[in-house]
Image (cartoon, helix red, strand yellow):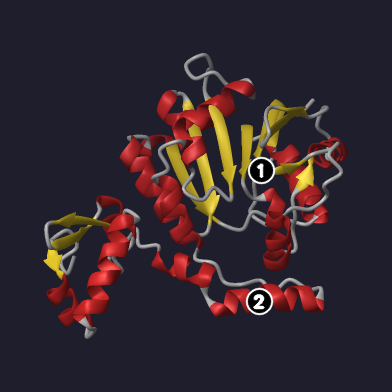
Amino acid sequence: MINERTPADAQAVAQACGCSPTGIRILLEYLSSIGVLERYSDKYALTPTAATFLVPKKQSYVGDLVLSETAPETVEGYLGAVRSGQPYYPAVPWAQDAWLESYRSSRPAKSLEMWRLAGFEPGRTSRLRVVDLACGCAIKSLTLAHADPMVQVDCVDSSDVLEVARDLAMRLGVLSQAKFLPGDLHSINLGKGRYDAALLGQITFYLTPEQNLALFMRMHESLVPSGVVVIDVPMISDTSGERESLASVFTWATSGGKAHSFAEYSHWLQVAGFKAARQLGLTWLSAEKP
């Protein structure tokens, strides 16, 4: 553990940390029980997953993200937002969140299912130009590119997050099919009639209704006729009467956004000029430009 994957006993770890061997031994046992460490007799080593994400010198380190979500300042931020009625907009290490997402094993299959339901069957299209706004690691769009060499993807996000997307594109062997465009989704120039499909993945619930409508109008302009916008986002039920969830409270407190219903998304998309939206699943919807 002292050298990432090299097993070490409690005495060596305690000496490196300046802690009690008894206390460290108890901690090591706990960490091995929850899968952070592997135990080899009386020695311990980081699991491959922990070695990837929890070693500070690694590019894929996500410890700051974990600590930020559990810090006292975060709790106080939520409480302050409730007291004041105003979001507190914390600094989030989005690149670290993207590293975690880029290794999520369930994502590729689910992403292809989303694209198929939206009408994009890999291998059955001519050249397909996709823009992935606020792309994160871009695993959803890059998975489509991996499945179909005719797909070209423009990934839009901050520069540090795009480094994660570039790394994933290299891992998938699709670097030649991707471009990486640093920019803000609210202001980046998307051009007119440039894309066949636009993806918004896990971002619109961070935005206000006004921001979503303005974004949909810009995306409508960027698409060719019959172009499709695909949105992947948690939605609240139109019929349950449950207007807020715990996730919505946290989202509002940190960004001013909230979870919306399919009916709300459908209305905004129609105002922006799209045909009637289709709900593809619990978290997926799409709409076509006339």
Q: Specify which label sits upstream in the sequence, 1 or 2.
A: 2
At x 19%, y 79%, the residue is 21
Disc number for residue 29: none
Which element is circle 2 on?
helix
Disc number for residue 77: 2
Image spot of residue 286 (x, y percent): 71, 31
- The answer to which of 29 and 272 lies nearer the viewer is 29
Q: Residue at label 1?
A: 233
Q: Quadrant of the N terminus?
A: bottom left
Q: Amino acid at mark 2?
A: Gly
At x 58%, y 79%, the residue is 73
At x 73%, y 42%, the residue is 235
Q: Amino acid at mark 1?
A: Val
Image spot of residue 14 (x, y percent): 19, 79
Residue sitting farthest toward the top: 124
145 above or below 44?
Answer: above
Q: Quadrant of the C terminus?
A: top right
- The answer to which of 117 and 222 lies nearer the viewer is 117
